[in-house]
Image (cartoon, helix red, strand yellow):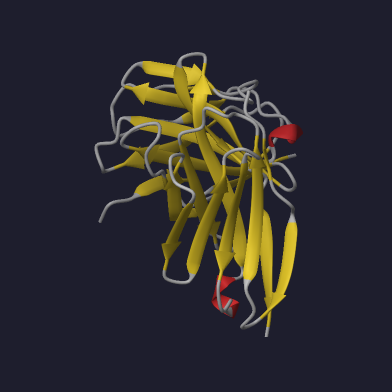
Amino acid sequence: GEDVEQSLFLSVREGDSSVINCTYTDSSSTYLYWYKQEPGAGLQLLTYIFSNMDMKQDQRLTVLLNKKDKHLSLRIADTQTGDSAIYFCAVIGDSGGYQKVTFGTGTKLQVIP
Amino acid sequence: EAQVTQNPRYLITVTGKKLTVTCSQNMNHEYMSWYRQDPGLGLRQIYYSMNVEVTDKGDVPEGYKVSRKEKRNFPLILESPSPNQTSLYFCASSPTVGGEQYFGPGTRLTVT
């Protein structure tokens, strides 16, 4: 099955950029998502990228996809204290002829004022 | 308002006492899924359902059951809970497997 890995913690200063990384194993992955989980809440979709794209920008968020290295990253520009949360990448891949979604371990982003 | 609801939000129970966590969505989504979230392990899929009466095991199905008798509801059943099932549980729904998933608020379960 698919393995999706993320580092567990990231600490940045307010105003700096944050880069959260994700690696996956299934080269047939079609959709790749970033979800945000605020304390005490469920996950909410932040942004996504299709596997035929290299980059997607959405206001302060930039998603980069390196298919060769199976590496996905989320860059948050001008990080704010409200960005403190856990960030999950999720990868849609093929599993025995069916599409399957696999979530990463999550990266806890701490923003220091 | 489009949403996924779960009940209860918090539950403390004892080993072996059967329990059910309900999940309901009002978006007419075909795909529904249950996850558990544990520190350092991220979100792991327990069971999923492609449509009414169609369910399948996820990555960690042992000790759990589900049913999908109606499109909107997808309850999670623990027939004989054990302490290693203490976790935070999320239900999610989406129009398709590959689409955006909408998550419920979570159910924090403690089994003593």
Q: Quadrant of residue B87?
A: top right
Spot occupied by residue A80 in the image (x, y as percentages of width and height)? 57, 79
Tell me if residue B14 comes above or below residue A65 in the rendering. Answer: above
Q: Residue at x 55, y 48 (%)?
A: A65
How many marks overall? 0
**Would residue B97 be found to the left or right of residue B59 on screen?**
left
Spot occupied by residue A81 in the image (x, y as percentages of width and height)? 60, 79
Q: Mark yes or no: residue B8 visible.
A: no
Spot occupied by residue B69 in the image (x, y as percentages of width and height)? 32, 21
Instruction: Kindly give the residue lying farthest to the top in the view shown.
Output: A96
| Nearer to me, A70 or A84 | A70
Spot occupied by residue B31 in the image (x, y as percentages of width and height)? 36, 31
Q: Quadrant of residue B98?
A: top left
Q: Residue at x 28, y 26 (%)?
A: B70
Q: Residue at x 55, y 74 (%)?
A: A77
| Nearer to me, A3 or A55 | A55
Q: For the C terminus of chain A, which image quadrant?
A: bottom right
**Would residue A57 be found to the left or right of residue A73 on screen?**
left
Instruction: Kindly give the residue lying farthest to the bottom in the view shown.
Output: A113
Q: Residue at x 34, y 16 (%)?
A: B53
Tell me if residue A70 comes above or below residue B1 in the rendering. Answer: above
Q: For the N terminus of chain A, which image quadrant?
A: top right
Q: Mark yes or no: residue B102 visible.
A: yes
Tell me if residue B98 comes above or below residue B110 in the rendering. Answer: above
| Nearer to me, A55 or B36 | A55
